[in-house]
Amino acid sequence: MNAEDLSLLALKQKPDFVETPVVRSLCERATSYLNAGYPIHFSGPAGTGKTTLAMHAAAKMGRPVALIHGDDEYGSSDLVGGQLGYRSTRVVDNFIHSVMKTEENVAKTWVDHRLTNACKYGFTVIYDEFNRSRPEANNVLLAILEERLLEMPSGRVNEGYISVHPNFRAIFTSNPEEYAGVHKTQDALLDRMITITVGQYDRETEVEITAAKSGLARADAERIVDIVREFRGLGVHQLPPTVRASIMIARVASLRGASIRSEDPIFRETCRDVLRIDAIKVTREGTPAASTWLDEILDRNCATAKNEARRRSAPARGLSLKRQELEGAEALFSGNGLQECKGFDVN
């Protein structure tokens, strides 16, 4: 049976994959654990490159890859397999031309799914966002990862158990449990894997990734990354912008031929949209504060010399919110909702 029949991926290491010292360390740790036979688990917020790291680690294993995406509707049969459809056979006996005998037999057909095939043939499984599946659906993984046995449902004929192939490897990714749409993972499953936490990258890594994914010059990538990092540091988003935001801004600016300058209208609009400025319902004296913050950040990081001189000579705007004011204000978020803050309003 070939890889095409089993819906597998043949992953190769991507030429634009960025390996700064931080990323290289993550990858070396991951591959060393996999080579030792342990499943690994990349855990972190959205936009931090967990799936990319998982695919890169799987490519280093040099084996076909079965990709599974977590789903709240999944049961164990969606991972292992089930009786899907029927097989019908019909025998017609016309040995005596005046007598016709017909025999029909209908039986359910069992189909192995990706996890079962990976266990049988020693493939690598990437289970992306596995905690979006319900814990009871993932219980089948417990014996696979510990006892190296896959227990098959009763509907599968002649095989109650399958021994897991020695080359089988498993890579998991997940968002933290406070994210919407995810389930709490059973401790027994987490105890069987090695978790690598992936967070926001350092500036150098974000610049290298942004430049590699967009094709922009390094100086332009630096400006974009500095804008996103400074805006992220304000702490006004429940979901802070990640390196993915930098890549989006850089790619769109490159595609539309925008210059990475504060006075370029296309670049400014792209920053507003990607950073979701209009979604920040914070006002100061009745005026949205997020637009003011973005204007100031853009001017600091990518203004031309002419505009920079004009900005420095202009009087300070009354709506400008200083960083120390923001740091001294009460927390913007309380639980799942917004509360009124000192010095400015939250709508």
Image: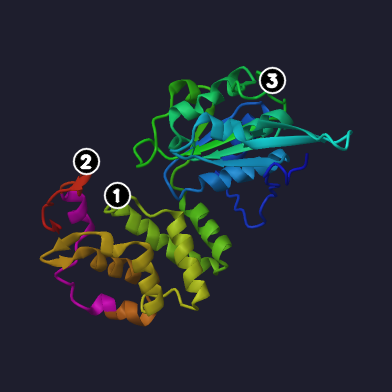
Give the left or right position of residue 229, taking residue 317 as reference: right
> Is tag 3's residue or tag 2's residue first in the polypeptide sequence?
3
What is the x, y in percent for residue 68? 57, 40
What is the x, y in percent for residue 62? 73, 41
Q: Nearer the viewer, residue 18 or 257?
A: 257
Distance between the alpha carbons at the discs numbered 2 and 1:
10 Å
Residue occupying the point 16% across, 50% down = 329
Label at residue 278? none
Contact (CB < 8 A) between labels 1 and 3?
no
User: What SS does tag 2 mark?
Assistant: loop
Label at residue 159? 3
* For residue 15, above or below residue 218: above
Q: Nearer the viewer, mark 3 or mark 2?
A: 3
> Is tag 2's residue or tag 1's residue first in the polypeptide sequence?
1
318 inside magenta stretch = yes
Contact (CB < 8 A) between labels 3 and 2?
no
Question: Mark 3 is on which residue type?
Answer: Glu
Residue, disc 1 = 238
User: What SS does tag 1 mark?
Assistant: loop
Residue, disc 2 = 335
Q: In which quarter of the image is the C terminus?
A: bottom left
Distance between the alpha carbons at the discs numbered 3 and 2:
50 Å
Q: How many neighbours does mark 2 have within 10 angstroms: few (below 14), some (14-19), or many (20 or more)? A: few
What's drawn in magenta, residue-wise? 311-329
Residue occupying the point 46% across, 49% down = 202
